[in-house]
Image (cartoon, helix red, strand yellow):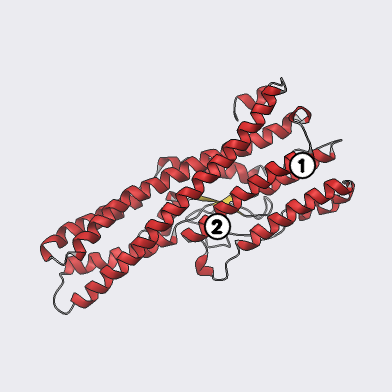
Amino acid sequence: MVSEGCFRRNTLTLLLCPGTNANIKMSRPQEPHRPLFHFANPFRKNSHKGSQFNPKLRSLLNDFETTLSKKLQKLVPNDKGDILSLSWMKLAMESLAEIHCDIKNLIAELDLPVTEWDEKWMDVYLDISVKLLDISIAFTSELTRLNQGHLLLQYGLHKLESDSPELFSRASSSLHSWKQHIGSKNPRVETCRPILDNLVESLNLPKVKNSSKGKVLMRAMYGAKVATTYIFLRELDAVDACVKELSTLLQDGVGTSERESFKNSVSALRKTEEKLSQGLDNLLKVVDSFFKIVLMGRDALLCNLRKAGSAVPDSVIGKNV
């Protein structure tokens, strides 16, 4: 069976993990098991400062944080086995997309023109967005790669379901190639490690002086920035378990006594293969939607800057635009 470490190297997603630098840390394959998620209030450490806002700003911030809290609660699974499944990852990506839409709406409701934005605020927003775009591209690359390898799995299944012993050797070769394919490294995903580490390490946002609206904006951005963790696809593990069982049967030969067991294994592989295929397709669509939402928000900010006759700060041009 493909190791957990291998899956962790090859798959990732953006998940909401509210907390602080102290309780968010990238998981490494060699580290002991630890809870991946900290469903705490990411705004608790700043909650005592809310009294400085006027009623309108306080209401806007409370509404945003309440909505964010509800979205996080939806990610708490009833069954531990649901964590890190493709369906759960889809829900997490949908939540991230909704949160970025909420931030865009909050900026509009704050009535805070970009001409009044501090250079540091723009740097924070553009820095977050470019990292999310890079990770989305890497994630799409990995899902596409897995879908390409899926053809090997489907070919092997087709030969197995033909019930022709002459084709079993081809099926065995195809399944072996599939296992090698999903176990290989994706360079794009590998380069995401420093991006994810940097997001976690930069949770401390710049201090905002003399601008209540700016403070609300920074706290909203904090809600979007407390993100990221490193995971693997449990459905792939289920498929790989079936492939391993079938490979053993094919190597040992399928006699009369093993025929029933062989058919059951083929049937189980077909079910997990269909679940994996549907899950990958659905997740690809959600990641693509998330990418477009982040890109639109980023483009809108830069467009408003150009219309206002403002230049993007020099510190931003080199690394974020």
The residue at 42%/52% (across/down) is 281
**Within-10-Å neighbours for mark 1: few <14, some 14–19, many 20+:** few
Residue under pointer 1: 109
Say whether residue 10 is left or right of residue 44.
left
Q: Position of residue 77 (x, y in %)?
A: 57, 67
Secondary structure beneath dot 2 equals helix
Instruction: Give amino acid for label 1.
Output: Glu
Q: How many marks?
A: 2
The residue at 53%/54% (across/down) is 27
Is any part of residue 262 visible from this angle? yes
Q: Nearer the viewer, residue 159 or 234?
A: 159
The residue at 58%/50% (across/down) is 228
Q: Position of residue 40 (x, y in %)?
A: 69, 60
Say whether residue 292 is left or right of residue 100.
left
Work out which quarter of the rendered image holds the N terminus and state it: bottom left
Say whether residue 94 is left or right of residue 68.
left
- Checking the image for residue 91, the label placed there is 2
Instruction: Give amino acid for label 2.
Output: Leu
The residue at 60%/64% (across/down) is 76
Where 321 falls versus 3 (above or below)?
A: above
Q: Nearer the viewer, residue 2 or 291?
A: 291
